[in-house]
Amino acid sequence: MGKIKIAGSLLVVLFATSLWVQAQSLPIPEGRRLREIVADKYPDGKLLIGATTGSWGLNEPIGEIMDREFSYVTPENDFKQAVVRANPNSWNWSRADAWLQHIIDNDQVLRIHGPISPQCSNWALDDSRTAEELSHELDTFMTALCMRYNGVEGIKYLDVVNEIALDNGQWFGPRPGTDVWENPWFIIGQDDDPNQTPLYVRQAFAIANEHAPDLKLILNNHCHPGSAGMEKVKETILYLRDRGYRVDGLGWQAHVETGWATEANLQHLRDVIDWCQSRNLEFHVTEASAWIMNQETQTLEEQAYTYKAILDVLLEKLDSLTIGWNTWHITDASGWQTELIPSLFDDQYLPKPAYYAVQLALESKGEYSVSVKVKHVGTGEDLEGCEITLNDETKYTDATGDVTFEPMAAGYYELEVKKEFMKSVLNEHFNVYSDTVITILMDSAKYKVSYRLVDSYSMADIPFVKVTIGSKVGTTDANGTVNFFLTAGTYSSTFNKSNYKPCQSEHHITSDTLLTTVLEMTHATIRFWIKDDGDIPVNGALVLLDNDSLYTNALGLCKFEFVRIDSSYVYNVSAEHYNSILDVLTLKTDTTIYLQLTKPVSNFGIISDPSVNDTFIYPNPANDHLYVRSGTDIDHINIYNTAGISVNQYQPRASSCQIDISDLPGGYYWIKIGWQGASQIIQPFIVH
């Protein structure tokens, strides 16, 4: 039974990923080996799944992978005329014979590939060769090959000829030189049938029919289904059969580019297979490739699809005939045109998506159950009522967090899991080719909860408010906002800021939420900004606020902090050589008072009688004594506190006097000076 575990949005698919574990020195793919699948699901022997390497690779990693994965093998060049007969005076069977015991030891079926083909010796390719020489060489080599390997244990198939025609329908023939792809056997001649079939084709099949009665005989070619060349191959098979020669199967090399598997091309492939079935022929894909021509625009997943789409068509037709599929590329570490990375395994011997695509195609036979279990990732709690969608079918988990889908055909599935207040699991994919158990670990969804803090009086945003919600703490920004990401639930929130009454609230969070909280100010800051009538800051101006006092700085500024709101405050601003300002403020919020001091008309305050001048009081502020000097005799002096109560009275009867104020508490006072004739002035002063 397959087991799949999904944590949050992470899908770990056992049997269908490129994860691997170490066994000896090579990575082992997940899931079953390809040969195990074939033996289990296709026991009648009508499906052959194989791969290619040379005798050089039998003791290399590529050979180890081949033996592990495939029960059907095709030596790439070891049986070809170019290897066995370098010239008419030599025979070298060593590379071919190296396979004999190997396939027995590994329980494999072998197909002899391409003995009469363009891959022939330089002697045969030499432009001076005559038809008679080539015919004699073909007869000598082909006869010896068939007699040597017919009836040998494990050898079941023979590609009698290879690459006889081109896609355009022309026969493939010789070319000048010995270093180009060419077919010199064409020189032997052509028959007088309508297609003028090359005589070497009939000659090779005649020898194989006579000396290889135990082998199944294949005509192999590279022309694509739907091409004129494939039609020429089909006509050649009928030509041979009409003349009494046995042909057991048609081989298509299937060297294609990634992306070849369009519906039109796949239909051409079906048509060829149907043609074979109607004539009792086996159909073999003999050299499967899926080239990646541009690694910037073509992906390994697209390559995998190309492989699987072709194999799916073969499996679709399997009930009516024997099918063979053989890849020419085991690993990108070695082989033909590895720069186009065509293989099932990469150059580190790790399985590529193409491998798993083949595995999936082979496993996709039968119906299975898919069980889904959903748990909470944090608590391990079984989650009831989760909406589970498998492709287009939707069910809900029971009280144990379980749901089962059955029967499910083998194949590729998309899974989605949703539940209120939980983070959804979307677009997860996995393959089904056995009874499968999937465990989903869901996490609680997190919602964006934004708090905006505003002042109850001004409704202005309040920065730097400490907001505590559950175990999380944040501070509002310059816009009075702070964000939290919370799971669904009920939360108590507290809000704290200097000068504001602490506040607490409770909210039930089920989605992204914006909450506005109004804070009530308890204390405020009063700022004084003092300038003269020339708009120049007044440094050292004394600002009295009830029983508190400050001096302005060089910028004409001073600040009273933590002053209780909803109260009225008398303030007095004075500076030497300036008229004082007295006023009352009712405080509601942070306040800035802008004041402009003016110079007096006389040397002393506002005088009710302009004839009285040259009057001074000093120092101000005073400590123990206050001095008063006037241009005329002073009749009386009264000192009042801020409540308007007289605290001292004097009758100096002189133009100047010293007043003892040592018994007065520090604070703000008023002095009233009077002269004969009812003239008087009133001036504030401070006692330190």
Image: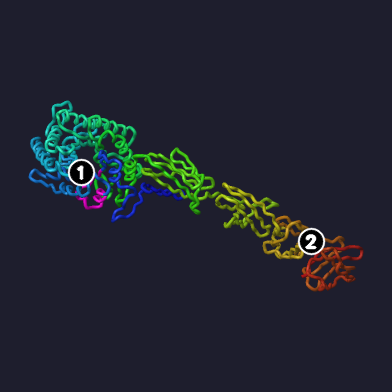
Question: Amino acid type of disc 2?
Answer: Pro
The percent coordinates of residue 314 (x first, y second) are 29, 36
Residue 158 left/right relative to 35: left
Membership of 179 in magenta stretch: no
Q: Position of residue 462 (x, y in %)?
A: 64, 54
Q: Name the one closer to the observer, 262 or 498.
A: 262
The correct choice, above or below, for 229 with respect to 307 in the image is above
Residue 369 - label: none
Which residue in the structure is indicated by mark 1?
A: 110
- Under mark 1, the amino acid is Leu
Write down the quadrant of residue 173 in the picture: top left
Residue found at the very far top of the displayed protein: 194
- Residue 429: percent from left, percent from top: 41, 44
Does 127 sit above or below residue 196? below
Magenta segment: 50-67
Can residue 31 be seen at all in this image of the molecule?
yes
Identify which residue, 32 or 200, lies in the foreground: 32
- For the residue carrying disc 1, how many other residues have a C-alpha within 10 Å: few (<14), some (14-19), or many (20+)? many
Residue 91's x, y, as percent?
A: 10, 46
